[in-house]
C-alpha cells in the first residue's frame, strides 16, 4: 500500500510523549484560512519553487514543453498542474530550486525510516501521524499505525477528525494517543473560516472521548486572532467536550506567526495582511479561565 508523504520529522518533542518521529501525510479536506502547513493541503504531489536557491539559469524554462515553467523579467513562474516532465526538470536544476512537495512511499518504506529512530522509542517516544489530514489516507495511515504497534512502538494521531465514521474508526483501532482539533464551535463560523461544517468533527469527537483511549486524548484549539479567541467560542468548545467526558484534557495553543512564510510556496494568501503577535501569558491565562469556567478541569496552555 502506498501513500503521499510530504515530510518525516525526527526528534520531535511536541507531537506526543517523549522523542517522536512525526510522519506528515499529504492532503486535507479543510481550508482553514490560517493553516500552519499549507504545503500539506493539496492531495496531489506538485512541484515547488524556492526563489532563494535560484541562480536564474533558465534551465527549467528551456525544458518546459507545455508552459509549466516560464521565466519573464528574471523571475521563474510555475503552472503546477501543467503536464510536464517535472522529475527531469528537477534533476536538471543545478541549484535545487525545484522540488516536488511530497513523495509516494509504501508502508514498508515509511517503516524503514521510522526504525532508524527505534532507540528513542524505548524511552517513552513513538510515532505520530500528522498532516495535512491523515484521515484522508486512512487505510495507509492505519497500516502504518498497525505496523508500529506490532513492533511495540507507541502511536499517536494529530487530526481535525473531519472524516467518515468508518475512516476514523479504522485508524482509532490502532491508536495509543490522539490530538484532536476543535477550532470553532459555531457551525456557520466553522464553514466560513474552515470551509466545512463541524458536525462530522463533533460526531467523531464524541466517539473519541468515549473510546478506550479517552484518557490519552488532548483536544486542541489554536488561538487565531479575531477568529477563535472570543469568549463564546472557547467556552462553547469547553462545554461541549467536558459534557462528553468531564476529565477531558483541553489544550489552548498560542498563535503561531511563522506559518505565513510558507504561503508563497503554494500560491495561497494568508489570512492576515499584517503580522499578528503571539498572545501574552496573561491573555493565555484568561483563555484558560474561560475554559475552566465552562467545565474543563484539565486545561493546558501552550505559550
Image (cartoon, rainbow, N blue to C red):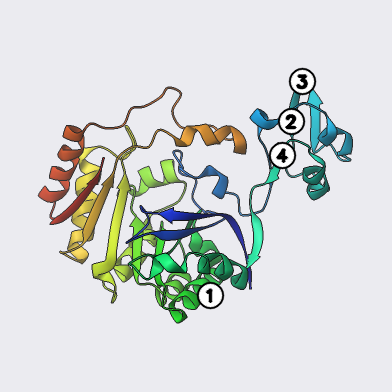
> Where is the C terminus found, in terms of image quarters?
top left
Where does the image place residue 229, in percent across and percent down from the top left? 27, 38
Q: Secondary structure at mark 4?
A: loop
Residues at circles 1 and 3 in contact by the CB criterion of under 8 Å: no
Residue at 52 percent across and 69 percent down: it is 115
Residues at circles 3 and 4 in contact by the CB criterion of under 8 Å: no
The residue lying furthest to the front in this view is: 119
* Dot 3 crowding, Cα within 10 Å, few <14, some 14–19, many 20+: few
Circle 4 is placed at which residue position? 96
Q: Secondary structure at mark 1?
A: helix
Q: CA distance from mark 1 to mark 3?
A: 46 Å
Where does the image place residue 82, in percent across and percent down from the top left? 79, 43
Marked residue nearer the N-terminal end (2 or 1) = 2
Q: Is residue 36 above or below residue 181?
A: above
Circle 2 is placed at which residue position? 77
Labels in figure, total: 4
Q: CA distance from mark 2 to mark 1?
A: 38 Å
The residue lying furthest to the left in this view is: 293
Circle 1 is placed at which residue position? 143
Amino acid at each position: 500500500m502506498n501513500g503521499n508523504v510530504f515530510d518525516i520529522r525526527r526528534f520531535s518533542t511536541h507531537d506526543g510523549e517523549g522523542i517522536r518521529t512525526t510522519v506528515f501525510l499529504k492532503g486535507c479536506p479543510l481550508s482553514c484560512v490560517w493553516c500552519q502547513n499549507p504545503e500539506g493541503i493539496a492531495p496531489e504531489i506538485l512541484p515547488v519553487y524556492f526563489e532563494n536557491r535560484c541562480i536564474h539559469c533558465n534551465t527549467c524554462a528551456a525544458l518546459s514543453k507545455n508552459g509549466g515553467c516560464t521565466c519573464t523579467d528574471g523571475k521563474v513562474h510555475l503552472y503546477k498542474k501543467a503536464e510536464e516532465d517535472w522529475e527531469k526538470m528537477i534533476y536538471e536544476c543545478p541549484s535545487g530550486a525545484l522540488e516536488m512537495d511530497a513523495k509516494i512511499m509504501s508502508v514498508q518504506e515509511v517503516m524503514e525510516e521510522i526504525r532508524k529512530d527505534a532507540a528513542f522509542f524505548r524511552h517513552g517516544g513513538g510515532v505520530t501521524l500528522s498532516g495535512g489530514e491523515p484521515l484522508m489516507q486512512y487505510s495507509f495511515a492505519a497500516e502504518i499505525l498497525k505496523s508500529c504497534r506490532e513492533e511495540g512502538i507507541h502511536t499517536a494521531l494529530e487530526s481535525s477528525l473531519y472524516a467518515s465514521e468508518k475512516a476514523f474508526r479504522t485508524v482509532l483501532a490502532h491508536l495509543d494517543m490522539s490530538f484532536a482539533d476543535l477550532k470553532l464551535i459555531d457551525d456557520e463560523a466553522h464553514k466560513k473560516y474552515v470551509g466545512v461544517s463541524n458536525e462530522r468533527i463533533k460526531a467523531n469527537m464524541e466517539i473519541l472521548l468515549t473510546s478506550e483511549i479517552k484518557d490519552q486524548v488532548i483536544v486542541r484549539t489554536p488561538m487565531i486572532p479575531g477568529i477563535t479567541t472570543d469568549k463564546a467560542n472557547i467556552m462553547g468548545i469547553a462545554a461541549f467536550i467536558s459534557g462528553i467526558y468531564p476529565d477531558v484534557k483541553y489544550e489552548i495553543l498560542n498563535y503561531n506567526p511563522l506559518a505565513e512564510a510558507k504561503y508563497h510556496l503554494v500560491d495561497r494568501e494568508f489570512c492576515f495582511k499584517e503580522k499578528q503577535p503571539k498572545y501574552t501569558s496573561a491573555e493565555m491565562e484568561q483563555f484558560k479561565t474561560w475554559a475552566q469556567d465552562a467545565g474543563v478541569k484539565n486545561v493546558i496552555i501552550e505559550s
